[in-house]
Amino acid sequence: MLNIPITLPNETTRQKIAEKVRESRKAREPSKQLLEIAKTGVEWAILLQRGYANETDEATATTWINEQLEALGVELT
């Protein structure tokens, strides 16, 4: 094996890295939920465009999407 010296980060840097990893993991679930909401919205749009759904279904889908976004604390601007 090669004897390549590896410098380990100091405690402050390790703590910063650990915090970034925790933040990333915390953001993962809401990201998955947003993706599912977006996929459902696209599916509804396709159904509407192809005539498999009507305006009532569109209103229901829009309401559902807005409720899901509100539950996640997402505001559309």
Image (tube, rainbow, N blue to C red):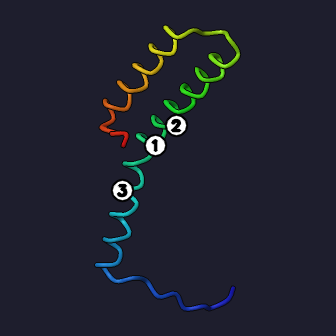
Q: Secondary structure at mark 1?
A: helix
Residue tagged 2: 35
x%, y% of residue 13?
A: 34, 78
x%, y% of residue 60?
A: 45, 13
Mark 3 vs mark 1, CA separation in Å? 15 Å
Instruction: Identify whether 23 is placed above or below 46.
Output: below
Mark 3 vs mark 2, CA separation in Å? 21 Å
x%, y% of residue 44?
A: 58, 20
Q: Secondary structure at mark 2?
A: helix
Residue tagged 1: 31
Give the mark toward the camera: 3 or 1: 1
x%, y% of residue 30?
A: 41, 40
- Residue 49 in the figure: left or right of residue 29: right
**CB contact under 8 Å: marks 2 and 1:** yes
What residue lies at 59% left-to-right and 28% top-to-bottom?
42
Any mark on residue 22, and which?
3
Is 73 in front, or is 12?
Answer: 73
Q: Quadrant of the C terminus?
A: top left
Mark 2 vs mark 1, CA separation in Å? 6 Å
